[in-house]
Image (tube, rainbow, N blue to C red):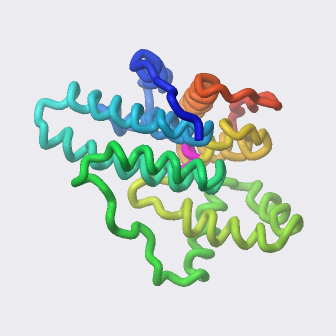
Amino acid sequence: MASGLRVPPSFLSGLKALFPESSHIPQKAVFGNPWYIVAAVAFSASNRPEAVPQVFQYVLEDLKSNQNASDSSNAEGKVVAQKLREALFKSGLTSGYPKAINALKSLHECMPEEWKETQLQRNPDKSLADYSSAGDNLFNAIYGQTATSVQTLLDSIYPDMGWFSKTIGYGLVYGHTESLSPLETSYTLVAALIAVNTPQQITWHLDGAQRNGATLEEVKAVRQVSMEVAKFSGVQWQHPVPEVRSV
């Protein structure tokens, strides 16, 4: 595991500024700008788990400076904590769960005791058939008219891959959207995929984020934040990172 990376607040401020202010999401102190979700996942996928708590602490300070009432910033901080946990967990399916575990551990170690999660977020009693149905809905929403061809590809290269993707990936893992919205989940996928340098899948999910409601400018910002973090972390790409195209 990499260690010792120190992230200047000025770098994080620059990442935050990359996201367009003219968003269709209301520009509240934190929740109108998902830069911190993208940055934390990109650091994790770049094997820099020690940077994740630094992102978290920056957001908490940002909340305090933008809130007059401490109760409000405390409540929003707890939401940020859960969003980051969920984003890191989801990203593990793309970047590898050893990386996600290390990032979650680093985040856990700096987490206020009262904000630590102790309950399962997913329903262990839900049937695989129900997860498969939910996964099918999310898969179609993300892939749009390309859903059939992508599912056919996954089924043909290995039937278990097709089943796993729909049922476990999109149903059980990505399909839980109570704390991380479908759009934020798309951003999580883009950030992890850019760090691990898989161009075909990056293209799929740059497109998918737009189908989930992102503007072209927002997706471009997610791509740029992910690339800035990966470069800062020492990632060197074997292949060019795909550009954002309008879908």
Q: Residue at x 78, y 73 (%)?
A: 160
Instruction: Left or right? Give the position of 220 relative to 51.
Output: right
Image coords of residue 143 (percent x, y): 69, 54
* Quadrant showing the C terminus: top right
Q: Residue at x 60, y 27 (%)?
A: 233
State the residue in front, 150 or 6: 6
Dominant secondary structure, magenta: helix
Task: Name above or below for residue 171 compared with residue 21.
Answer: below
| Residue 102 seen in the figure | yes
* Quadrant showing the N terminus: top right
Instruction: Left or right? Give the position of 129 relative to 62.
Output: right
State the residue in front, 36 or 56: 56
Image coords of residue 25 (percent x, y): 40, 37
Q: Which residues are magenta?
A: 183-188
Image coords of residue 165 (percent x, y): 69, 65
Q: Residue at x 46, y 83 (%)?
A: 125
Task: Name above or below for residue 209 compared with residue 115.
Answer: above
